[in-house]
Image (spheres, rainbow, N blue to C red):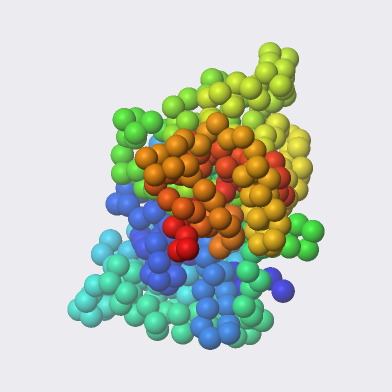
Amino acid sequence: MALPVVAIIGRPNVGKSSLLNALAGQMISIVEPTAGVTRDRVSTIINKGDQYFELVDTGGYGIVDSDRLSSHIEQQIHLAIESANLVLFMVDIRDGLVPLDETVAQLLRKNNLDVIGVANKADTAKMFPAAAEFSKLGFGDFMCISAKNNLNKADLLDQVFDRLAHSTLGHNPKEPSMKIAIVGKRNAGKSTIVNAMVGSERVIVSETPGTTRDAVDVRFEKDGKTIVAIDTAGVRKKNKIADSIEFYSYVRATHSIQRADVVLLMIDAMVPVSQVDKKLARFIAGEYKSCIIVVNKWDLAKDIAATEDYEDYLTKLLPGLKYAPLAFTTATEAKNVQSVLDLAAEIFKQTTTWISTAKLNKAFDILKQEKITAAKKGKTGWPKIYYATQIAINPVTILMFVNRPDLFDENYLRFIVNRLRTMLPIEEVPIRLFARKHRE
């Protein structure tokens, strides 16, 4: 059963993103004094006991966007309104009633929506009487809150749950079977591939670089399973990050990698691999994240380079992701996008595989019998492995009991990992390998 949807609607800079974060109890939307930071619909799930609803943050209605995306932002607001069971109509008590508030009110009346008026930035009770003028908008008395200071947050939530009582409040939604983060430099096609996965215009797509600013979680169903695709902002070189919005966008992108089960590193086939691509690849490898390197816009590049040549090219430039499979897509036509989702499911299966101790040690027995040039003799002798056991999944983590952990240098550990990939059903995912001294 779909959860009821509560959309936060209002003109720019009234505090919509602050309210989403306050009600969620965590930082989800980027909050900045600059108007127009939020562009896409950013959502989270709110609950009280066993009752749940989806809360949706939207861009400021009437924003004059510096990147000429006003029509796209407005379309996302309309989509949020169409799906909403309840709207939180937000105004700024400090500014008082302004013409754009009246424009938003007309839009909400036109759609015949259930509305709770919310007067934000009422930091003290002395300010509450000023909210009376908003009753002219036709939605009754506006509740005074301060999203920044959490003032009246609990009262607002209670009112939301009361209003939704006539709807069927959802029960605990299914945990997603897999979270996929889509990362890459600007204009690589991240938002386009998310829309192709979902089959609708869920996030804004534009040729304007930097269109996506936040990390946007998009839930959808495939083969009876719930998947979350995390659309992220395009990453730039550190010395080209222009402002705090871009800095927060980069932080959200790296955090999205950390919380994902599988990462799609989007590569633009029409431009050379950049320092940003290499930086993201190093970060993904350093976090031991399962990854698919998605070469997008392949329809434009396939006549220039052969697939095999391009694979060699990426292996040379992104050596830390040698384990990651490649996929070639044309996201604008949704070509191979569903195959990427199927591949992600296979990768997730590998990274959540538990290998029996017997099977694991059989692989180590084979490895020990081989003539290993990667091993180096230390002052106290050669490195020796007694046995190994798997201690975690996602990433697959293996603990070896050895004679001297200091004899297992980075090169030797890398050699062991590469050999294990050829012998075990984990050939396309990262492996964490630890050595611990065996007490004889």
- List x then y, in percent, for residue 298: 69, 25
Instruction: Name the foreground residue: 340 vs 93.
Output: 340
Residue at the extreme top of the image, as rendered = 304
Residue 116 relative to residue 173: left or right: left
The correct choice, above or below, for 300 with respect to 347 in the image is above
Task: Provide residue 5's location: percent of width, then percent of height.
Answer: 59, 69
> What residue sits 39% from the left and 62% below the top?
27
What's the residue at 52%, 48% (across, down)?
Answer: 384
In screen coordinates, is 64 left or right of 145? right
Please, is residue 273 above or below residue 152 in the view? above
**Which residue is painted at 66% across and 25% down in the image?**
311
Q: Is residue 136 visible?
A: no
Please say whether residue 12 is visible from this viewpoint.
yes
319 and 16: which is toward the camera: 319
Q: Quadrant of the N terminus?
A: bottom right
Q: Quadrant of residue 439?
A: bottom left
Quadrant housing residue 147: bottom left
Q: Residue 400: where, in percent of width, then height?
A: 53, 55
Residue at far right of view = 223
Looking at the image, which residue is at 59% across and 27% down? 315
Q: Which of 52 and 401 lies nearest the eye of the viewer?
A: 401
